[in-house]
Structure formats: C-alpha cells, structure tokens
C-alpha cells in the first residue's frame, strides 16, 4: 500500500507541471506551424528537457501577444481579452 501512495504523491506533484508544459508545446505548434524537436530522438529530448538544456525558441514571426503567452508573461484581463481573440483570428488567416 505504501508504494501505491508514493506513486500517487509523485503523480500529484508532477501532473500540473506536465500539463502546463504540454499546453505550451501545443500552443507553440499552433503558432509556429512546425513540429517541435523535429529530427531528435525521444530519449535525447526527454533527457535534455528534464536537465533544462533544451527549450523551444519563439520565432520573431510570432506576434508579441503570443510571445508573452508562451513565455509565461500574459497580460490578459477583461479589458483586452477581445484583442487576443481578434488577433488569433487574424493570425490564423495568414
């Protein structure tokens, strides 16, 4: 029973970080229209991410509002939320 509790504790500790990371990668894929870590082996990717040696770069072509979102510095509130939606619509048409 102790082993099961230990696994559950680790899962709870890591789950939020994994979900946040996954969201960031999906957002990066949508904005760049590229495959992340293309050409690299899975084991290498995992090792480099876990050790903090591999990060996805944000291309200059990505609008500033999305750069801030990807870099974890969003400034979204009720006043400017409609701008993010409008820009997303325009950006997806390019």
Image: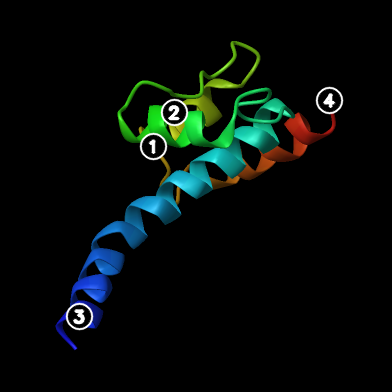
Mark 1 or 4 closer to N-term?
A: 1
Mark 4 or 2 closer to N-term?
A: 2
Q: So how many labels did they put on this image?
A: 4
Instruction: State the mark number for residue 19.
Output: none
Q: Residue furthest right?
A: 93
Are there few (<14), some (14-19), or many (20+) residues within 10 Å of tag 1? few
Mark 3 or 4 closer to N-term?
A: 3
Instruction: State the mark number for residue 75.
Output: 1
Q: Quadrant of the C terminus?
A: top right
Q: To which residue does mark 4 refer?
A: 94
Disc 3/disc 2 C-alpha distance (Å): 38 Å
Q: To which residue does mark 2 refer?
A: 68
Of residue 31 and residue 36, the one placed in the foreground of this image is 36
Disc 1/disc 3 C-alpha distance (Å): 39 Å
Q: Percent from the top left, x then y, of residue 55?
A: 44, 24
What colour scheme was applied to this rendering of the protein? rainbow
Foreground label between 2 and 1? 2
Q: To which residue does mark 3 refer?
A: 5
């Amino acid at each position: 029973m102790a082993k099961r509790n230990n696994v559950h504790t680790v899962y709870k500790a890591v789950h939020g970080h994994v979900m946040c990371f996954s969201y960031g990668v999906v957002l990066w894929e949508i904005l760049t229209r590229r495959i992340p870590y293309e050409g690299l082996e899975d084991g290498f990717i995992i090792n480099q991410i876990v050790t903090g040696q591999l990060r996805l770069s944000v291309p200059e072509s990505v609008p500033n509002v999305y750069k801030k979102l990807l870099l974890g510095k969003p400034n979204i509130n009720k006043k400017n939320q409609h701008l993010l939606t409008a820009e997303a619509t325009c950006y997806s048409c390019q």
